[in-house]
Amino acid sequence: MSGLVLEHIEDLANFFAEINRVLKANGRAVLSAMHPAMFLRRSQPRFTDPDSGEIVQPGSDLQLLYLDEHSPSADFAARYPRREKYVDWPMLAVLDFAK
């Protein structure tokens, strides 16, 4: 279980490699992260330090500029019948970040 931590990890490749290393055969990992759309609303994770009471807002070197999700349409599925099962199902997310 990884609750809302992915946006705070610099080295995601090592993070996922470690998950792969420790999972048993047929094991499962459950991850959650703040949806990038939240950043478009200028929402950011924040925590209260239990010792000082100070509000801590972890930073990020990336700023989400644009988010778009795409689903195949019925017209698309008519041309590519194997895609019919995906009509109106999000298949592609486009995220544009700046440092």
Image: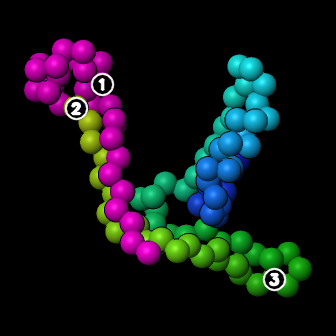
Question: Mark 3 or 2 closer to N-term?
Answer: 3
In space, the residues marked 3 and 2 are separated at their CA atoms by: 48 Å
Percent position of residue 81, x then y: 18, 14
Quadrant in which residue 18 is drawn: top right
Q: Is residue 76 left or right of residue 96?
A: left
Q: Is residue 79 left or right of residue 35?
A: left
Residue 92 drawn in magenta = yes
Give, as a single range, the part of the protein colored magenta. 73-99
Amino acid type, mark 3: Gly
Mark 2, secondary structure of its residue: loop
Question: Mark 2 or 1 closer to N-term?
Answer: 2
Residue at 64% of width from left, 77% of height from top?
57
Q: Is residue 55 above or below residue 5?
A: below
Marks 3,1: beta carbons within 8 A: no
Q: Which mark is residue 86?
A: 1
Amino acid type, mark 2: Pro
Q: Which residue is mark 3?
A: 53
Percent position of residue 86, x then y: 30, 24
Q: Is residue 31 left or right of residue 88?
A: right
Which one is closest to the eye, mark 3 or mark 2?
2
Residue at 64% of width from left, 74% of height from top?
58
Which one is closest to the eye, mark 3 or mark 1?
1
Q: Count the marks: how many? A: 3
In space, the residues marked 3 and 1 are separated at their CA atoms by: 48 Å
Q: Is residue 83 above or below residue 89?
A: above
Q: Is residue 82 above or below residue 73?
A: above
Q: Which residue is mark 2?
A: 72
Amino acid type, mark 1: Tyr
In space, the residues marked 2 and 1 are separated at their CA atoms by: 6 Å
Question: Mark 3 or 1 closer to N-term?
Answer: 3
